[in-house]
Image (cartoon, rainbow, N blue to C red):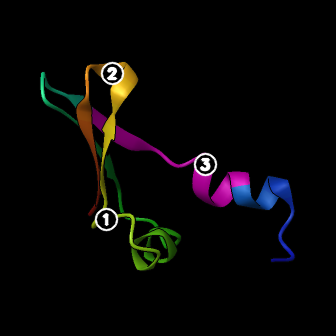
Amino acid sequence: EGARARTLFGKFVNASATVDITPKEIIVTFGRRANNQLLFASGYAEREQTIPWLDNRQLKIRFL
C-alpha cells in the first residue's frame, strides 16, 4: 500500500519471463524470483483469460 511506483516496477513489472505464443494460447513463464511468491499467492497462476485482440488466444501465467 505504501510502495512507490519505482519499487513496484522493479519487483513486478521489470521481471524476466519467457513468452511462448501458439495458435491457441500465450504462455508467460516467470523464472525463480523471491517476488514471484507474492504474484503466485495473488492467484495469477490459476487464471486463464481470453485476449480478444490476439485472435482470442488464452493467456496463461506460470511460475517456476
**How many other residues sit within 10 Å of disc 2, few (<14), some (14-19) or many (≥20)?**
few
- Where is residue 5? Give x, y as percent: 83, 55
Q: Which of 32 and 55 is in front in this view?
A: 55
Judged from the image, the secondary structure of the residue bearing numbered disc 3 is: helix
Image quadrant of residue 46?
bottom left
The answer to which of marks 3 and 1 sits earlier in the sequence is 3
Circle nearer the viewer, 3 or 2: 2
Circle nearer the viewer, 3 or 1: 1
- Where is residue 51? Give x, y as percent: 35, 33
Q: Residue 13 carries which label?
A: 3
Judged from the image, the secondary structure of the residue bearing numbered disc 2 is: helix
Q: Which mark is residue 45?
A: 1
Q: How far apart are marks 2 and 1 (CA)?
A: 20 Å
Side of 14 relative to 39 (left or right): right
**Residue tagged by mark 2?**
54
The answer to which of marks 3 and 2 sits earlier in the sequence is 3
Judged from the image, the secondary structure of the residue bearing numbered disc 1 is: loop
- The residue type indicated by label 1 comes to Ala
**How many other residues sit within 10 Å of disc 3, few (<14), some (14-19) or many (≥20)?**
few
- Where is residue 21? Give x, y as percent: 22, 27
Q: How far apart are marks 3 and 1 (CA)?
A: 16 Å
Q: Which residue is drawn at 82% across and 53% down?
A: 6
- The residue type indicated by label 3 comes to Val
Q: Nearer the viewer, residue 42 or 16?
A: 42
Q: How far apart are marks 3 and 2 (CA)?
A: 21 Å
Image quadrant where one finds the N terminus: bottom right
- Where is residue 39? Give x, y as percent: 47, 69
- The residue type indicated by label 2 comes to Leu
- Magenta stretch bounds: 9-19
Q: Which residue is drawn at 43% across and 80% down?
A: 41
Q: Residue at x 26, y 19 (%)?
A: 55
